[in-house]
Amino acid sequence: MTILDEAGTPDVLSPLCGLRSLSEELSDVLIVLVGTRSEVHLSRLLPGALTADYSPGERVRFILLDPETKVRQGSVASGVAEAADGLRGIAAVFVVCGRPARQLGVDAAFEARLAERRLGVPVRAVGLEPEGSRILSTDLEDRALAALVDLCPAATGEIAPTPPPKGRTGRLFGGLFGTGRPERPGREQSRRVVLLGAGSPPGAWQELASELDRLGVEVAGGLPGLGAASLPALGEGVVVAACSPYLPTAVRAAAERGALVVRSLLPIGIGGTSRFLQDVASAAGLDVKWAGGPHPTWEELEPLRSRIRGKRIFFAGDTGLELPLARFLADAGAVIVEVGVPRLDRRVLSAEIQALGGEVDVVEAPDPEGQMERIESSRPDIVVASPGLHVPLAARGWLCCQSTELMQLGVYGYRGARRVLEFLCSTLDRAEDLDSIKL
Amino acid sequence: MRVVAGVYEGPSAHGILRVAASLKDVWVIFRASAHEEYFQVLWGPWARYEGRAPVSLSPAGGGAEDLEKDILEAVRRYPEVGAVIVARSDSALLSGEEVPEVRLPAREDRPRRLFRCPWQKPGLGEHEAADLMLAELVREYAVPQEKTPEPSVNLFGAPVLDPRAEAEMDELQRLLAGLGVGVNARVPLGASLEDLRNLPRAWANVVLYREAGESATRFLKERFGMPRITTPMIGSAGTGAALRAVGEACSTSEERVRRLVFRELAQTAKLPWYARLLSPRTLRGKKVAIFGDFTYAVGLGYALSREVGAKIAWSGTYLSHLEHDFSFHAGTFTEKTFVAEEPGEVTLRVERTRPDLLIATHFEREAAERSGASFLPLCPPAAVHPFVRLPLMGYRGAALLADAVDGALRRTRSPSPAAPEEPVWTGEALAALEEVPAFLRGRARRLAEERARELGEHRITREILEDSRF
């Protein structure tokens, strides 16, 4: 495998684009962006340009800063209180601030504390600046999840007694999803699990929770989960399973609370999901034995696999989930031409890099222009394109599917694997149908 | 610092990017934090051009050397580029980032130029910046030239990402051909640096979109004595007035202009025909409200009030730097003019005055729905970017306007003889309502009125207001 850092400016969506989707995931949280005209303009315009829905979201508000005057201390807190006035059912407020707000003298943490005293609900400052020099569209999600971790009630540290066998439980998913395939563990006590990330689309984490439930793992909840009013307890004795590679702040916050953070393959694709479930179950104290041979889901997906087998796929790279998706598609028989990744944290993604195999080129921080040239020369069957490359590539005749659309499907778990394959197959089918029309 | 529901205008960098990306042979270095970059993503679904936008990001905070390197890299990579423009984002401006003087390697035919936009400052809005950018380019490139032998004009329209810009230039070009007047250059959309150089060859400048072309055409008037035609070409009367002014500037016979106008009124423009078909009962008691930029808000106000005979209850703009001129022009067709930079203020006005027809920007859609008004989102910023670009200017635009208004007036509320009586607000309740933040006031008013109806009360007291909000 070649890993090349192209040091380009990858075509990545601004984290602010996720303001509305974050609000959809956290239905009882008021999100207030404190920023400049540029940030407010972007936050209102960009999600609309991508989805044709220009409404800002019921619980998203903006505090527009005047760039020519320093912000008076306490005025942002007053603005937050004003923004929250008249809204019902708010369990928490997130005050989102980027660098311009800081430059104008906004002390976000202080203003959040002040607003909390006025409103009587938790108010947290959520920063926007990336950890390194490279941004990811998930940076806002990372900071918001870290804020949610902070709001979680403390776990008692007790380890839960092992629940009764499947189908007879009264837990969240007990009895809903039939019997599990792997054999039940023989341990007496297990830790509760909290799933971190996997918030898009809202509720996606529940599919993973149901899979864990089938193994007998008790899932206390997810983050973002069901909202700020229903946060799971977090602390010693709790296992936190990260479902996204780029949540460093949230993972650190969970670890600081004493939770055991599990890193595994990401729960994307069949192999990734199985390994994730196994590692999480093991960390929870359950000894899950898997039946030998390929996972039965592979057999169910065979018609889709046969459609995708041998197809050459190119990932332009903007979401941060390219490596696990490429690993899954390679397992499914596709040929991965190049995997672009906006930022590559080798420590977090080492298992993914290893699982991807040696034949694939990984390009960190790809330069979009260079990437277009490589697409021309490598001639892939499908390009998983970032929003800025989608139209130019389609105009040059390449078959593209949008990475953002792929993410919105819900890519996690066994069902996510099916949705990914179905989406790519429908892209191929549609292209064939269109090619057959005599114009 | 204000709590807002959004902003109509983008930052100054957005205006610069729109003008620069409209031109050929120009590259823009956008000095910004990566989280401030969104032009390239808008370019795909909105402009729908086949290539990428001629913009590259230079990360803010990297120091002057990095910026210089990025400028030179753009020139190396795109050797056909004749001008490089550096636009700074809000955070770059707030950091006090300056653009260094960089000597660009010359092209074979003529030197390359670097535009550092030193006039950019925090707080400058998108339209003012677009206007200043275009003026700077024109000042730099336009040189004295002999006039074209046959009469010709330059068209100054809206920059890229405006869904109508191209179609409106096409429409005007079609009409000018009918007068025997050629188009020397279309600016900024699709213009090359050579076109900017040759601007003084034209006999006059037609300003279709004053927001972007005001300063450039003023400079051309002062420096080269080129007349400006600034009448908004919206509606049949506006289009006719502008064509007569073009005819005068290009020494076209009055008879030829009259023939063209008559032909177009007979064949293309349906607005006067529609106005004659319209029953006076349709308009009786109907209130029309208009809100938008300058050109469309004023042009539509003129067309609706003079040609259709509608009563314009109020008209507003979000362009505060054009407030004086806007009030002057809009004051001729309505008694109430105002400036509002924040959608919440307009929402409040809509909910308070309940117009029958609201012509505004896409931000007002929900307010119109809530107040039961028919809605036409004809003013920029527009959220719809169709493949088929239709003009709102010229005679074709007048016909499209007739269809749009006809449909909208058919959808307006019919006055019902048994319409419920408007509730009465007590002074105390009104005072309490004033304490509610502006952008929530409309919602609070509505909830209080609903609550009063539930309780069977005609008077809205402070208690009912409090009761309805929580």
Image (spheres, grey):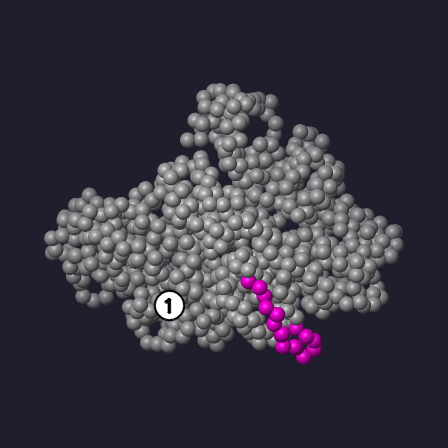
Task: Answer with left or right where residue A286 lies relative to residue B322.
Answer: left
Label 1: which residue?
A344
Task: Answer with left or right where residue A14 lies relative to residue B16.
Answer: left
Q: Quadrant of residue B365?
A: top right
> Helix, strand or loop at disc 1?
loop
Residue at 63% from the left image edge and 41% from the top image edge: B339
* Placement of the C terminus of chain B among the 4 image quadrants: top left
Residue at 58% from the left image edge and 54% from the top image edge: B122
* Depth check, front residue: B34 or A170: B34
Give residue B307's position: percent from left, percent from top: 74, 40
> Can residue A276 be seen in this snapshot?
yes
Main SS of the magenta segment?
loop
Residue at 83% from the left image edge and 65% from the top image edge: B147
Give residue A234's position: percent from left, percent from top: 25, 50
Give residue A359's position: percent from left, percent from top: 35, 76
- Amino acid type, label 1: Leu
Give residue B211's position: percent from left, percent from top: 68, 52
> Can residue A193 be seen in this snapshot?
no
Task: Read off the chain for label 1.
Answer: A
Q: Is residue B110 above or below residue B323?
A: below
Please say whether residue B111 is one of the residues in the magenta stretch.
Answer: yes
Range covered by the magenta-colored residues: B97-112
